[in-house]
Image: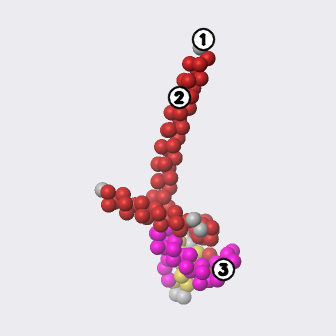
Amino acid sequence: MLKCMLDQMIDLDRTFQALADKSRRCMVERLTLGPASVSELAEPLAMSLAAVLQHVQVLEACGVVKTKKVGRTRMCQIEPAAMTATEQWITDRRRAWEARLDRLGDLLHDVATTEEKP
């Protein structure tokens, strides 16, 4: 079980590292609209096709993007499972913090109510 948790954390680390780059986030955003070629991903970016391909390879290595060769064109598409795991991790953290903040709010309310009584 510990190994599974460590593997999941490594995948999350790779995903967050990949998404830390603005250009890669732009590519992922474009791919949420549907599959695109590397050339199509490169259009709005001020970088060479080779640089775009390197970014795609980073996204592919962490599992966020899948690619396949169609003729002479490399097509890319989003891999929902990788994004789902990342979203779940964020959701779990948010729930934990919301619960803590709710408890703090209750405590502060109790203290304020106690101080108001003569």
Identify the residue at the far left of this view: 1
Q: Amino acid at mark 1?
A: Pro
> What is the C-alpha distance between the residues marked 1 and 2?
19 Å
Give coordinates of residue 11: x percent, y percent: 43, 64
The mark lying in front, picked from 3 and 2, is: 2
Q: Which residue is mark 1?
A: 118
Magenta extent: 42-69
Determine which residue is flagged by label 3.
47
Residue 99 in sight: yes
Query: Sequence order check: which comes first, mark 3 or mark 2?
Result: 3
Please state the horizontal and vertical placement of residue 54, each as a whole percent of the image.
Answer: 55, 79
Disc 3 element: loop
* SS under mark 1: loop
* Mark whose residue sits in front, 1 or 2: 1
Q: Look at mark 2 in the image and give the residue it sits on.
A: 107
Is 101 placed left or right of 42 in the picture?
left
